[in-house]
Amino acid sequence: MSATSPSSVEYETLRKVRWRLLPFLTVCYLFALIDRTNVGMASLQMTEDLGITKAQFGFGASLFFVAYFLVEIPSNLALEKYGARRWIARIMITWGLVSAAMAFVQGATSFYIMRFVLGAAEAGFFPGIIFYLTLWMPARQRGKAMALFALGIPLASFVSSPISGALLTLDGTLGLHGWQWLFLVEGLPASLLGIACLFWLSDRPRDARWLTPEQREWLEQAARPATNVGVAAGAVSKWAVFRSWQFWGFVLACCGASASGSVLAVWQPQFLKSFGLSDFETGLVNAIPYGVATVAMVIWGYSSDRLNERRWHTAIPLLLIGLSTVLVSFSNELALVVLLLTCCLVGAYSFKGPFWSMASAWLSPASAAVGIAAINATANLIGGGLMVNVYGWVFESTGSYAAALAPLSLLALASAMSILVMARGAGDSPSQQQAAIASDQT
C-alpha cells in the first residue's frame, strides 16, 4: 500500500492531530478545573479566616455557575466568529488572573463577587473546545478524543488536591494565609498557557501549517458532518435547537453528571476532613477518587468508540452515580466512604466522552456552537449552581455530609431515564440521531 493511500493519509493525519491538540488542550482544561474547584480545598481554612458560614460558602461557590450560564452562549458565538486560537487565549488569560485575585477576598461579599467574575471569565471554554474538536475529528473518533480531553476534569483534582494540601501548610509565610498561597500559585499558570494558545493552536484544519496540503484537504472532508441523511446539514437552524424536546433531554441527562462533579469538587474536602484528617491528609485522600476516575473515563470512552455505542455508555455511569450516592448515606467508615465517592466520580467523568459524542453528532453544523454551549451552561446552572446550594442547605439542616448527597441520587436517576427514553428511538449512530432530530422539527 502506498504512502499516499487514503488509509495512510487518515492514520498520519489523525495521529498528528491527536498529538498536536489533545495533550495541550487537556493541560489547559486541567488548569481550568483547578481554578474552578480549588475553592473546595481553600475552604478548609478560608471559611474560618473570613467568618463565612456553610450556607454562605455554598451560595458563593454556586455563583460561578450563574455567571457561567449567562455568558457561555455569547462566549461560544464569539469563538465561532473570532476563531478558537484568539478566543481560547482570551478566556485563559482572563480566568488565570481572576483566579489568582481570589487570594485577596475580604469577606462574604467580595467572595460572591469574585466567584461570579471567575465564572464569567471561564465561560465558554469547555463547550468551545468540544465544538473545536468537532472541526478536527471525524464523528467515529470523537468519543475517545473527547474522553482524553475531559481527562483534565478528574486530573485537576487528582493533581491539585495534594498540592493544595501542601500549599495550605504555608499558612503565615510572608504574611499570607495558606489559602491565599493556594489561589496565587494555582491561578497564574492558566494565563501563561493562554499566551501559548496564540502560538500553538490553529483555528481550522485549512489553517494548520503543521499538516501537509493533502492531510488538510482530507481532514476538512472527514470532519465535515454527513449530509446524506435525508436532510441538509444546516436544516436545523442555530436557535431552533431550543424548541426540540431532545435538547432538554440532553440538558437533563447532563445535569446528573454535572451536579455530582461540581458538588463533590466543592464539598468533598470538608466531608473527608470530618473524619479527623489534617489539611494535608485531606488533600491526599481527596485525590484517590479522581485518580481512579481518570483511568476509568479513558477506558469507557475507548469502549464506546470500539462498540460504536453511546446510549448505554452514557446511562450506566449515571446509574452508578445514583447507586453510590444512596449507599454513602449508610456508611460510617472512611475507607468505604472513599470507595463510594470514587464510584460516584467514576460515573460523573466516564459519562462525558460518550455523552458529548452523542450530543455533538445530534446537533447540526448550524446549531453546534449554540447547542453545545447551551446544554453545558444549563446543566451547570442546574446541576452545579443549584445543587451546590442544595448540599449546603441540607447539611445545615441535618449536620450530615453524607445525607446531603441524597438529592444527587434522585437527579442522577432522572438523568439516566432521560437518556434511555430519549435515545431509544434515535439510535446510536450520528446519521440516525440527525435524521431523528430533523424529523422532529419538520
Image: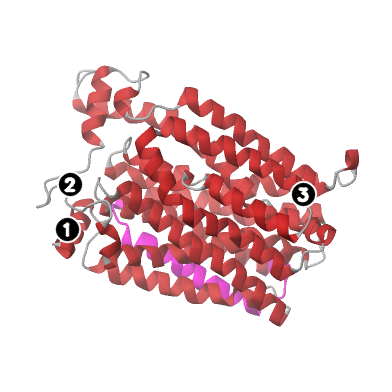
* Snapshot quadrant of residue 264: bottom right
Q: Nearer the viewer, mark 1 or mark 3?
A: 1
Label 3 secondary element = helix
What amino acid type is highlighted by mark number 1? Ala
Q: Is residue 338 magenta?
A: no
Could you tell me what secondary structure mostly forms the magenta stretch?
helix
Among numbered discs 1 and 3, the one appearing first in the sequence = 3
**Viewport quadrant of the C terminus:** bottom left
Toward the viewer: 321 or 44? 44
Which segment did they paint magenta?
307-336
**Residue pointed to by mark 2:** 233
Q: Nearer the viewer, mark 3 or mark 2?
A: 2
Q: CA distance from mark 1 to mark 3?
A: 51 Å
What amino acid type is highlighted by mark number 3? Gly
* Vertical arrangement, residue 114 with respect to residue 88, above or below: below
Residue 395: percent from the left, percent from the top?
69, 76
**Residue pointed to by mark 3:** 165
Among numbered discs 2 and 1, the one appearing first in the sequence = 2
* Snapshot quadrant of residue 312: bottom left
**Residue pointed to by mark 1:** 438
Residue 23 vs residue 269: left or right?
A: left
| Residue 423, disc | none
Label 1 secondary element = helix
Residue at image position (47%, 71%) is 412
